[in-house]
Image (cartoon, rainbow, N blue to C red):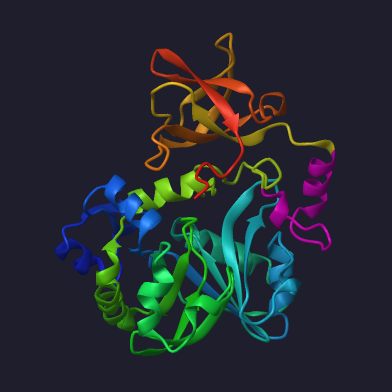
Amino acid sequence: MKNTALSETHSALGAKMVPFAGYNMPVQYEGVNVEHETVRNAVGVFDVSHMGEFLIEGEHALELIQKVTSNDASKLIIGKAQYSCLPNDDGGIVDDLIVYRVKEDTYLLVVNAINIEKDWNWIQSKNDVGATMRDLSEDYSLLAIQGPKAIEAMQSLTSEDLSAIKFYNFVVGDFAGIEHVIISATGYTGSGGFEIYCKNTEVKQIWDKVLEAGADYGIKPIGLAARDTLRLEMGYCLYGNDIDDTTSPIEAGLGWITKFTKDFTNSEALKAEKERGPERKLIAFELDERGIPRHGYDIVDGNGNKIGVVTSGTMSPSLGKGIGLGYVPPVFADVNSKINIQIRKNAIPATVVKLPFYKG
């Protein structure tokens, strides 16, 4: 089991630690609901240093990225980031990721912890153009400072104007007494804030100063359990649940990051799927009655026939009702369609809704 540079710090703060993607990670401190509300209403800090970071460099860097990712990375200017995915050869997804353009011919790819080795081998297998690849995952840490008070709470730690960094833009600047830190206006909570990329040797100082600077704003350390409820309220896909090697970006509702203005891995087949329409679609639903939908529960029609499966589900702390995502045939996918979630012996009625669940 790997530790992040902050694992001991989390234990000292009383975090409940669990194995996640091969890392010893804090799942919660005070409790999911308290931590969730902290991020929605104030500011919280997550250690997400288990994420992977690859540097792709050289004159052929963009060529490689364009070949392996679904989005159009040629649109990136220095200081801009882009959500994308790595399609496989069979219509599924190797991983979803964020691509940062750091310099003219330097890109940072941030991938899911569980897929670091898989992604590295996949991209390397497609690198016949001679781009330089470096895996920085073991040397870098990542903090997510999320919530509506993030800008106000963190401004004293940097000479950069945090309010000027637009969504999915970033700067390389000073932060918490450390130079050359990536301050990125990204995150997976839907409540605003920043992600801070730094070296493992720097992260403890940054963590301590972040908690100190945020004290007057009610900052708290937040675990992975609340990260999951926060992302689900926004309808953001989680790799391994909502998307995987068997789900296409088209059926997963990721057509917006799948650009057919260029050729990329399996693009012809995905384009054909988009034109004819997918055989199933990822939907969002809310339960009409009390209950908690869970990953793996069956989705059934009015006659009890199985029509799909829940990929993510929880009791929404913000809405106070059961919410979830799952795949169903297109005939059941329209907003306001009625479906049922099989929770033990009961088929609980649910309604297909438009994302996000949480409107802020």
**Observer-nearest residue: 282 or 245?**
282
**Observer-nearest residue: 59 or 28?**
28
Query: Residue at the location (73% across, 31% down)?
Result: 279
Residue 279 horizontal side relative to residue 124, left or right: right
**Figure quadrant of the N terminus:** bottom left
Residue 263 screen position, x and y as percent: 81, 62
Residue 335 screen position, x and y as percent: 66, 31
**Observer-nearest residue: 29 or 147?**
147
Q: Is residue 273 above or below residue 186?
A: above
Query: Residue at the location (68% across, 32% down)?
Result: 280
Q: Which residues are magenta?
A: 254-275
Instruction: Answer whether residue 12 is visible to the viewer in this image.
Output: yes
Query: Residue at the location (39% across, 23% down)?
Result: 290
Residue 12 screen position, x and y as percent: 15, 65
Q: Is residue 174 above or below residue 13?
A: below
Query: Residue at the location (59% across, 46% down)?
Result: 245
Instruction: Answer whether residue 128 is visible to the viewer in this image.
Output: no
Is residue 273 covered in magenta? yes
Is residue 211 covered in magenta? no
Q: Would you identify the image quadrant in which residue 346 lies? A: top left
Residue 281 screen position, x and y as percent: 66, 35
Q: Is residue 119 above or below residue 185?
A: above
Number of numbered discs present?
A: 0
